Image (cartoon, grey):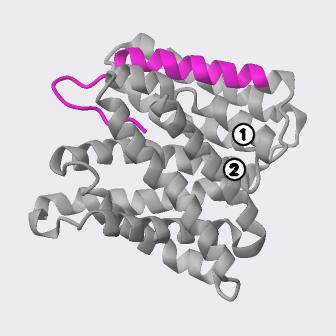
């Protein structure tokens, strides 16, 4: 239940973020959410700056910059294409990482299955594809794959959420040059409160729930549950954004979910705790 609640929190944050787009734009929304999240993490835990070693800096900075770029790219994507489609495309990133880490050639069939699902979702043969939206989602997919690799390195060095009190502020700084320009002149008390609410839904609440859930279940089981994210994205896209999928698109989501669950079977780390988002 904790893992499922985490998924719902992530996707609900994405769906509700669309409501701020007409006011501050997708990039401005990303900047406000990251900034609010950074301030919350700093308030919760003091950044462990004294324990940072020189060799940790590339991973910390890389993870922070990647988080900022993924957040901006993903919100730019859902401004142009349905939420479920964007999440399915973004999910190709971590799914490919899980398949490659399995050291089994047959595992590469899972990303191929997910790609078939994405094709059913986007239906490029109808000639109505939003190229910019697909490009932003693809950038988010590459960023999410990079995020997983860097998160494991940072997670092995810093306990709990202490590493996030460093990387999330870096993510906010990464989004500042782009988001501040888009949001300038449109900030109000209501917008700032909405950004704080979005930050609680993502990243604060999901990370806390995931840490508790991982104490009670294996990383592989947790990762399999995370494969449900595209399905939850379609559900909340329909309920909150009124984005009703057609039957071929529903089949596409099913293929992506099956591929995600299958890829997790060989994606478990050995002798280390795997951080799955």
Quadrant in the picture for residue 114 = top right
Toward the viewer: 145 or 16?
16
Residues packed near mark 1 inside 10 Å, few (<14), some (14 to 19) or many (20 plus): many
Q: Residue furthest top?
A: 106
Q: Label 1, label 2: how many angstroms apart (C-alpha)?
A: 7 Å
Q: Which residues are magenta?
A: 250-277
Say whether residue 158 is left or right of residue 133.
left
109 in relation to 176, above or below: above
273 in magenta: yes
Residue 212, image quadrant: top left
Residue lying at 40% horizontally and 19% vertically, measured from the top left: 221
Contact, mark 1 vs mark 2 (Cβ under 8 Å): yes
The picture places residue 35, in percent across and down from the top left corner, at 47, 71
Residue 166 higher or lower than 102, as above or below:
below
Q: In the rendered image, which quarter contains the C terminus? A: top left
**Mark sitting on residue 236:** 1
Q: Position of residue 107 (x, y in %)?
A: 43, 15
Where is 130 relative to 88, above or below?
below
Q: Circle 2 is placed at which residue position?
A: 15
Q: Is residue 40 left or right of residue 74?
A: left
Q: Which label's residue is closer to the chain start, 1 or 2?
A: 2
Image-quadrant location for residue 255: top right
Q: Residue at x 26, y 63 (%)?
A: 45
Name the dominant secondary structure of the magenta segment. Answer: helix
- In the rendered structure, does residue 79 fall within the stretch colored magenta? no
Numbered-mark total: 2
């Amino acid at each position: 239940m904790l893992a499922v609640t985490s998924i719902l929190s992530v996707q609900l944050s994405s769906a509700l973020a669309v409501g701020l787009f007409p006011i501050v734009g997708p990039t401005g929304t990303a900047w406000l959410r990251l900034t609010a999240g950074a301030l919350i993490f700093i308030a919760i835990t003091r950044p462990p700056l004294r324990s940072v070693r020189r060799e940790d800096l590339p991973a910390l900075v890389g993870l922070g910059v990647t988080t900022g770029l993924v957040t901006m790219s993903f919100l730019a994507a859902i401004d142009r294409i349905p939420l479920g489609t964007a999440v399915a495309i973004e999910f190709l990133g971590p799914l490919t990482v899980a398949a490659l880490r399995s050291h089994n050639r047959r595992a590469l069939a899972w990303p191929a299955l997910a790609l078939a699902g994405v094709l059913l979702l986007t239906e490029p043969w109808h000639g109505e594809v939003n190229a910019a939206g697909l490009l932003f989602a693809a950038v988010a997919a590459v960023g999410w794959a990079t995020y997983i690799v860097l998160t494991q390195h940072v997670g092995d060095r810093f306990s709990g959420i202490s590493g996030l009190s460093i990387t999330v502020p870096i993510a906010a700084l990464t989004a500042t040059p782009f988001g501040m320009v888009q949001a300038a002149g449109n900030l109000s008390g209501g917008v700032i409160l909405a950004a704080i609410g979005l930050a609680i839904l993502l990243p604060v609440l999901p990370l806390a729930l995931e840490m508790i859930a991982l104490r009670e279940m294996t990383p592989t089981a947790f990762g399999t549950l995370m494969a449900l994210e595209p399905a939850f994205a379609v559900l909340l896209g329909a309920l909150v954004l009124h984005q009703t999928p057609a039957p071929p698109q529903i089949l596409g989501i099913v293929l992506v979910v099956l591929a995600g669950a299958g890829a997790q079977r060989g994606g478990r780390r050995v002798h280390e705790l795997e951080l799955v988002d």
